[in-house]
Amino acid sequence: VSASRPPDPEVIAERVLGRLRYTIDLVRPRMLHAALVRSPVATGRLEALDVAGALAIPGVVRVVLPADLRGIGLTDEAFGTMVPDQPFLAAGTIRHVGEPVAAVLAESEAAAVRAVAAIRLSIAAGAAPLLDPRDALADGAPSLHDAKPDNVLARWSFAHGDLAAAEAATVHRIEGTYTSPAAQHVTMEPQVCVAEWAADGTLELWAATQSPNRIAAELERLFGLAAGTVRLHVRPLGGGYGGKNHAKLEPLAAALARVAGRPVRILDRRSEEFVTTTKHAARVHLVSGVDGEGRFTFRRAELTWSSGAFAHSSLAVVRGGGLAVCGPYRMPAAAVASTMVYTNVPPAGSFRGLGANQAAWAGERQVDEIATAIGDDPIEFRRRNVVRAGDRLPTGEPIEEARWLDCLDDVAARLGLAGGSSAGAGVALAMKQTMTPSRSGVELVATTDGRVEVRSNLVDMGQGLRTVLARAAAEALDLPIERVDVAEPDTVAAPFDAGTFSSRGAWAGTTAVRSAAAALRARLELTAAGPAALAEAVRTSGEVAVAASAEVTNEAPVDPATGQATSTSHWHQGAVGVRVETDLETGIVRVTEAVGAAWAGRVIDPVRARLQNDGGLLFGMGPALIESLDHAAGPPSASTLLDYRVPSILDVPDRLETSALEHEDGRGEPTGIGESVIPAVAPAIAAAIASVTGRPLRDLPLDPARVLGPASDAGAYDADPDTRPAGPAPWPIDRPAPVIPRPAVESDPVELRLLVDGTTRVVQADPLAGLGAVLLEALGPGAVRQPCGVGACGGCTVLLAGRAVRSCLVPAGLVGDRPVTTIAALGPDDPIAAELIARGAAQCGSCLPGFVLALRASFAADPTPDEAGIRSALAGNLCRCGSYGPILEAARAVAARGGSGGQAAEGDGGVRGSSVEPDPGPDASAGRS
Amino acid sequence: MARLRRPTTLDEALAMLADGEAGPVTPIAGGIGISLAMALGGSAPTDVVAIGHLDELRAVERDGGDIVLGAALTIDELARGAARGVPPLLAAGAAEVANPGIRTVGTVAGNLVAGGPASDLVAALLALGATLDVVGRDGMVARSPVDRPPPAGTLVRGIRVSAAAAGWGWGWQRLTTRGAMDRSSATVAATLTPDGPRVALSVAPVRPGRLRGVEAAAGPAVREAAIADLAAIELRPDDRVSVAYRRRVIPILVERAVRAASSS
């Protein structure tokens, strides 16, 4: 195992201190802000829009209707990087709640959003929406797309072995249907892009995307541009998790910019994220058999996926899920049919785990059911059946590097289950293919000052790829890492890359860098180490800069027995084990221990490997226990982070451990690990619960009613229908209609004087506008973040008179003369920031300033909190990447040293110690209007 | 035209609340409730009076056998206020409201008024036998129940609770499935007073209230009494957990809260 090496401190520090600027922070000169008018209904035809109210709002430039996109030279009315089926704006037929039907362009985001709320839509009612694939597949169901009259977007299947013989050899047979609902990625930075046309007709974009080359190519197709001319830049992402894969807002942004003749930015508001992309809802029907010795005889699987209204990455999901559903087991016969179905719900896309999550939920759940049915131990059953090197997978293809048993043994040993499972514990295995074939190019440019620039379109989204690339180049060229620069992805300047997903980036990037470095050495005839030798070699060549590039491709190996290419170049392999406490009276579950093992081949960076694996476990816990979206009522069941809940720091198991397993001889190839444990999380938790309750669990999430199962005296409770309030409650609670962007505050601004980080800022603002929005206006993009807007994530935290507050929910007019502290007041020597940086405790980083400030306020009030105090101080801050572990460790280290030292940042206000005294409150004389 | 006014005294605030030129005047303290309503698409109030800073609303006072907790004390101050006489049940309940960044700003009265039946604290206050001290423009002071909006034209001045409540046994149960920042789907509070137990349920019911049958029951009969009480209570719809599930589980929460109150 490699020595622990913290990642590049600068890369971590700019995240901890909030200095990293993401695509959401980008401002282009003359940029217009687009806000999308979205359909409130799932089906229908748009007949008219009344835009008069919108056009009357100051700052609104125009409203773009579908017809306005006809004269701009588009080669296709629909876009899609896999299947071009998505209209830029729904010209007639509406296919899902939230589908864009028009766009407002305005000089400010606030004006655009207000204008959207002022537009009146006339929509002719459509057919009953097809919300479930079963409805869409029914005889006589209307077609979503003419090209697919039966609503089947894609089928993928395989059959292997002699099923009839296998069924004949079967002693025990089990059958079940397992469901996974839709879910949402909840990146702290939402979907965002800016498109800009140059006078010479070239198109340039800045987009928060995982697949820059793929989107650039799609834009070239749509606008009839020469290949390789669309220039797309990507800043580090504030979270990806598959949600920023494939074209989403970019084609519309480019079209709007063309219409307007000015740069156009589209930013999803949080509620819009839930109608832009989701995880696929899936229903998996499985029949499995085992022989008298507890060995699999066969499995038959039918997977039915809800693609939503458009394809996005569904072609990859229908295959990825089908490939994984039989699991990594010896299975003499298998037949799998995977069907992707168009439905009238928001489009589903890739989601960390890509189909393997839904497949493993069914496949691994049924493994436990089988083991229980035949009285076998679930760990022993898996050991008996798991594929080993040289075996064949259920697809019939050979597998040379089979490491599932190592992963299983690792988690079993660490949970004390080496001899078999026990009540309250559960394990599961994960397998996921990687995108095959794919290619990644890298160019290295050496200069006469002894530096090297790495040009690659691999995207850093918190997994630290920029550091990985820099380190690989430094090692391959014998340079100190400070001499290596990694350029931002740029589709014109850097070679083609298939995209940063499928856990392929670290492998592809390091491999390509090494090849390019070898080519560069050869060109320069470089033999000595160090910057001086490099500079000399470049000078000797007579050039200012010398470039060399390389491309790596992955291809599936060919099965020697059949001559056929196999499914994937590499199988991501992992195992998860958990212990849970199940409240048998309420059905509420708490995961107390979670351990994961991922086959890594070789670990490049142990700190980041741990962050990825720990984060994967936590990411998997959300859809297992609390996350789901349904569309039964039409709009998504959640549209804010109040309704859609992702795991908090108090959901972190008391023990959370992951390991990245390496090749015995230390010469293994590094493989991706970002998705190797996620698919196993939900089935492991379900197995642990079922081991105590003895009840089947076949539907996600594992909410308490499901865990509890039907009431014993069913008549008393279950017959009770959900009642609606008969009359008005004393305080009616209005449920807001989701989806439509919210109007900004409309009243007249007043002058406010805010003391921010020691400087008085005079701003014109509505007194009821959120402090965060006012600070953004006054201090510039990125100064504070507003990830959720409803006080539910903590990403917007600032200090007000030393206390941590949610800047999104504090009216600016109430601040008075109380000092405001933002993350900009702190430097790398701040004790909390320093601990986080030293531990490399950052992935995408967009949540971290909120954590730092929340901790700062907490330590000011109590310099030596106990564990409960630390956790409760951080209980309001969400980190979707799941860096909670090192954040907690950093906080503990600060507490152990007696707090943050009481160092006051400039302008840090009031509170020290005594927390029971009332807050002095805003000075009554300040800011009176 | 929108305006935010900032009075210096409670009397001034009450006068401002009565002089709305065009439509209602909205008092705000921390501003959380109104900001959240606006973020969720509600319309912005046009005439707002800030009251969170008024000294008269931020005191903890002894009044005979009662303690009056100022309406504009923040929820965080309540959570940390045991040393100042805040009953431990109320402190424990306050410590679980929303999240730390909201508790430092949001106030107890704001939680009651903005949260209504969805407020956890209503259950705690009912179980403590608390009432609201409300003041009107004419200086009229009155007591108002904690589970109703204060009368029109009045402001909540404080929460009145027996000083003896600090010594009562208590129990507190919230129905949540996430470790932090989860709104409750049902909240039960129980106290053991010298006159017997007081048990209240909020969030889940359309109208929060005491569970009289439970209060009259004892020991093993508590769960059955809760089932009977619940049969007469209308529950609100909840996206997370069904009415049927809550009818099944609330009696268990009641039993646990009562048991905790009896043993603390």
Image: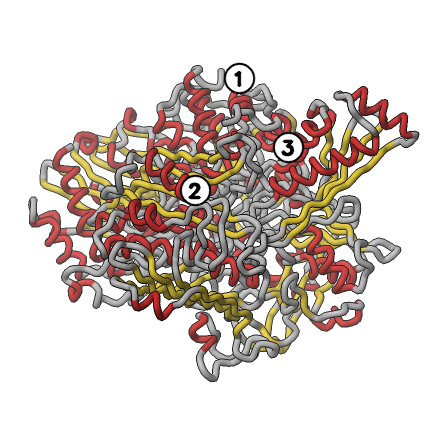
Which label was assigned to residue A150?
A: none
User: Hey, what amino acid is under mark 1?
Assistant: Gln
Tell me what residue is drawn at x 56 percent, y 80 percent: A149
Instruction: State whether residue A763 appears in this view.
Output: no
Q: Could you tell me residue A20's position as x and y percent?
A: 64, 35
User: Hey, what amino acid is under mark 2?
Assistant: Leu
Tell me what residue is drawn at x 40 percent, y 59 percent: A180
Say few, some or many: other residues with alpha carbon within 10 Å of mark 1 (under 14 / 14 to 19 / 20 or more). Answer: few
Tell me what residue is drawn at x 64 percent, y 41 percent: A236
**Quadrant where the image shows the C terminus of chain A:** top right
Taking the image as shown, residue A921 lies to the left or right of residue A267, namely left
**Residue under label 2:** A617
**Residue under label 1:** A903
Taking the image as shown, residue A391 lies to the left or right of residue A727, namely right
Residue contact between numbered discs 2 and 3, judged by CB atoms under 8 Å: no
Distance of label 2 from label 3 (alpha carbons): 23 Å
Indicate which disc, 2 or 1, sits on the residue closer to the N terminus. Answer: 2
Disc 1 chain ID = A
Which label was assigned to residue A467?
A: 3
Say few, some or many: other residues with alpha carbon within 10 Å of mark 3 (under 14 / 14 to 19 / 20 or more). Answer: many
Pointer 2 and pointer 1 on the same chain:
yes
User: Hey, what amino acid is under mark 3?
Assistant: Thr
Tell me what residue is drawn at x 86 percent, y 28 percent: A538
In this rendered view, identify the residue nearer to me: A432 or A116. A432
Q: Residue furthest front?
A: A561
Element assignment for label 3: helix
Pointer 1 and pointer 3 on the same chain:
yes
What is the quadrant of residue A405 in the picture?
top left
Instruction: State whether residue A205 appears in this view.
Output: yes
